[in-house]
Image: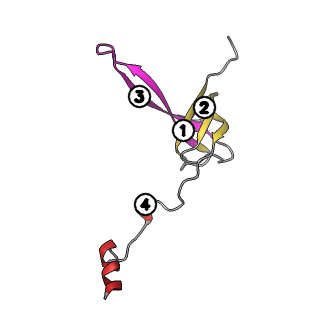
Amino acid sequence: MAGTRRQQQGTVVGDKNDQTIVVGVSWMQRHRIYKKSRRRLTRLVAHDPMNQASIGDRVLIEESRPLSRTKRWRLIEILQKIDVAEVQPAQIDRMPGELLGESSETEAE
């Protein structure tokens, strides 16, 4: 069994740091009394040397030696690339007089 490293599939939930991604791996946990299953999310910090992965991508990561205080995983491959909008909703600015209802009223006059 020596020499085998665990691999996990997950979704990239953070990519702001250089050469680092945060991968969310979900798994099911049964309640010990009620026996109801619930979904849990574990966040793993992985090394991405080429900065290839972005938020939303499905990736395969593998255990590695400690690369920093929290980094214990490395990116093996990107399984599915997801295109996300370049402009985030918080970055969209509206003009003060520009409301949805006002634009149709000014055209009617």
Residue numbers of the magenta segment: 21-47
- Identify the residue position indicated by label 2 in the image: 73
**From mark 3 to mark 1, how far is it between C-alphas?**
14 Å
Q: Residues within 10 Å of mark 1 (few under 14, many from 20)?
A: many
Relative vertical location of residue 1 with respect to residue 41 in this rendering, above or below: above
**From mark 1 to mark 4, how far is it between C-alphas?**
21 Å
Q: Is residue 24 magenta?
A: yes
Mark closer to the chain start, 1 or 4 = 1
Identify the disc placed on residue 11.
1
Which quadrant holds the C terminus?
bottom left
Say which quarter of the image contains residue 63.
top right
Say which quarter of the image contains residue 66.
top right
- Identify the residue position indicated by label 4 in the image: 89
Which quadrant holds the N terminus?
top right
Residue 105: horizontal and vertical position, in percent? 30, 81
Whether residue 94 can be seen here: yes
- Observer-nearest residue: 43 or 26? 26
- Observer-nearest residue: 20 or 67? 20
Q: Secondary structure under badge 2?
A: strand
